[in-house]
Structure formats: structure tokens, C-alpha cells
Amino acid sequence: MDQSLRSCKKFVHLDLKGAPPRIGYLIELIQLFADLGANGLLIEYEDMFPYEGELKVLQSTTQPPYRREEIVSIQDAASSRGLEIIPLVQTFGHLEFVLKHEVFRDLREVDYCLGTLNPHHDAGVRLVQEMLQQVMKLHPKSTSLHIGADEVYMLGHGDKSKHWLDVPGRSVHQLFLSHVIKVAKGVQESTPNLNLIMWDDMLRSMTPETIKESGLVGLVQPMLWDYNPTLDVENTVMLMERYKSAGISQQWVASSFKGSTTVHTCVTSTQRHLDNHLQWLKVASSLSAGIKLQGIALTGWQRLDGGFTEEAQKKVVEILGTVDVEDIERTSSSFAGAKLAELIVKLTSSMESAELRHFQNNMFLRGWFTPYHRQKKTINPLIAQQIKTQAKKGEMRLLYSDSTVQEWVDQHITPVLEPLHNLQRDIETVLNEMGLCTE
């Protein structure tokens, strides 16, 4: 195996927006990550960070953000196991949690897009600088910071950007680089000696000359991300070599465990993500000596050092009880989230069963409200309802806030069960009108 991969850092990305775990469960996860071989955490707080002053409006209102002492406890838990923490704060794109607020509306690149910051407003730069300073002040031991900057798709569409681009020789590439460099230099002034990282996708179409001439080299290290199970190894290596030719030798990579499939996925496809990791191993082993691979971030979960060998698989089974989420109900895992995972696997299976998916068609073909439907509980999905109750009132609430639990139920269970309950109600109404018992 390539020696650079053995020596590079292995980070787990914790995306805390949307469904942040309770602090006790989060600390248990940190212990698990350390047991599995991680040596760092890439933490993206978004609205779960306890911003203060004029930024207090950024705090989540769906559930309380983590308290300052809880942020400290996360760091203490990580430090006790030798895990380094790199905060991730978006500074250009994906700023919906900031720009959705009316007070910051004028800082949008285009009014109808909440995600992209207008790079021409000094107030916008001051805003992200204040966010970065508050986060880093609460992470005094962190020596690196990730400034995001991925998928800034609407850049150049705003009126001020269009006016700026009217000048001959100017490009969206230059506009992007100028903002990133301005943010990076601001961080250097306020927090010297801090290593800065950014997502690489906005750099991919740039020539080495454009990157080199911008002044970016030496300020920020790119983190290449690709979550495809059939990642193109040859093209990825060529991209990394191109960055090197621009003068950027220190580079990071990122694989994925979730969030890179479909928006409605409930149960992670283990094989898909394992294949993605294995492709990245091929990339690492193909790099020239001039590229200094700094580390790999598993966006959302954990990976082990090196290939998925028999030894690695044995270690995962010892800790989790399985290497495949869908097999978890056949194991006796002591992992804190194992029971919830088992319930979700069962629930997903029930929700996707042929009986539920083709209920209305099958109902007319087989007969109206026959004993068969009662036996299979097609009209009254009792099993699914029991799992729903367990998930809602038991395991899920142990790990996540009530608002997160309710949102998950509303998204994944209610849309399936509600039509069935409505149909059951209509059938009972008809039977009652006929004078028939509905017991």
C-alpha cells in the first residue's frame, strides 16, 4: 500500500445541520471513531453553533444549538482519544442558514438564491470573518480550518458581478479566487499560523496559470471530493497533478458514507461507499512523489487505514457487529445506534414492500377488504405502526432531539401510512353505514 496513505490523517466529517445528535450520543460516536482508527474530526456546525452578538440570529430555532460547554466537551472527548478537530465554516456558497435571514438579505449574490454570498459587499466579508473568529475562539487548540467554498453556482449572476465582469479580461474564476483569497488573508491576520483548507470543485476548470497568478498558492490547501463508487482514478490523478503544477503540493481528499446518493435514502448502501473508498486508495497509490497527501475526510462516517482487508473487516465486525447496515438485525452489536439502525432497516423494508407499494391495485384484484388483507395487515399496517411508535418514542429520541425525530417521521412514515389510514377510515365508514361490524 502507498506509504503516503499510511501516514496521512484520517478525518470523520460531522455534518451537524439538520439532524444533530444529542451530545451524549455524539461523544459516544467520537469514541467509536477513535476505536475504528480515525485521528481527526471535520466538524460542520452551521446553525448548531452558539453564535453570539449580531450573529445570534444564526442559531437554530428548530432545536437549541449546542451550548458553549458542550462544544468544549466535544473537544475534550476528541482530545482524550488523540483526535484533532478541524472546524468547517462555509464562507461563499452553501450559506443558506445565514442568508435566509432578512437582516442579511442584501448580502445575497442574487435575491432569489439563499446560498451564494455577494463578494462585492465589504459587509459580507466582515460577516464571514466574524463567523470564523467566533468558531475559532471556541476551538483554541485547532491548528486547521476548512473554509468551504464549494458549489458557488450563482456567482456572476448578480448585478454587481455582471458589472464587474463587463471589464475586459475579467472572469468568474478571478472573481471566485479574489473572494477566497480575501477571506484567507483575513483569517491569517486574525489567527496567524492557521492551516486553511477549501473544497476544490470551483478550481477544477481553472488552468494552472490562473491559480498560480491569483496568489492562492500557499494560502489554502484544496480538498478534492468525489463520492462516486466508480470514481475515475486516472482523471482524478491528473487533476491532482494539475494542482501540483500550479504550485499546490499539499492536497486533501474526501470520500463519503451518506448524502451522496438520493435525497430520500434511509438505509446507507455500504457497498456503494466502500467501492468509493477503494477507488480513492487507487488514486493515492498512483500519485507522484511531488504531491503531499495531507489526509482523507470521510464525509459523515468512518474509514480505516488502508484497503478493506480481512484484518480491517475483522476489526469492524468486532466493534460494530457487522460491516453492512442491512445485516444489523442479525447481529448483537453493542454500538449505541444499533437498535435504531435495526428499527429503520425493518421500517424501510415494510414501507417498500410490494403489499404497500401496490396496495390499491392489489386491493381491487384480490377483493375488497378480504380476510387476506386483514391477515397481511395491508389496510391496517400494524407492524409498520409498531415500528413507528418504537422509533418515535424510544430509540430515536435517545439519540436525537424531539424535533429531529418528528421531522424524520413526517418525511418517511406519514406519507406512506396516511393514505392507508384514510382508506381504512373510508372502508369503515361504508361498512358502518351498511350496518356491518368493523371489529
Image (spheres, rainbow, N blue to C red):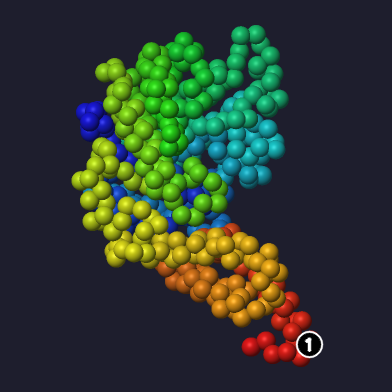
Whether residue 410 is visible here, answered yes or no, is: no
Residue 241 location, x and y as percent? Answer: 37, 17
Q: As drawn, which residue projects farthest toward the top?
A: 168
Q: Please tell me in which quadrant of the rendered image residue 309 appears.
A: top left
- Please, what secondary structure does the residue beneath circle 1 have? loop
* Residue 266, above or below 405: above
Whether residue 6 is visible here, answered yes or no, is: yes
Residue at image point 36% right, 30% down:
252
- Tell which of 13 and 231 is nearer to you: 231
Residue 254 location, x and y as percent? Answer: 39, 35
Q: Amino acid at mark 1?
A: Met
Residue at numbered disc 1? 434
Badge 1: few (under 14), some or many (20 or more) residues near its Cα, within 10 Å?
Answer: few
Q: Please tell me in which quadrant of the rendered image residue 297 appears.
A: top left
* Residue 283, above or below 303: above
Classify residue 77 as left or right of residue 381.
left
Residue at image point 63% right, 30% down:
154
Q: How many marks?
A: 1
* Residue 362, above or below 197: below
Q: As drawn, which residue projects farthest toward the right?
A: 433
- Tell which of 254 and 348 is nearer to you: 348
Residue at image point 31% right, 63% down:
331
Classify residue 416 as left or right of residue 78.
right
* Residue 15, above or below 350: above
Classify residue 389 as left or right of residue 287.
right
The quarter of the image holding the C terminus is bottom right
Classify residue 403 as left or right of residue 293.
right
The quarter of the image holding the N terminus is top left
Residue 85 location, x and y as percent? Answer: 33, 42
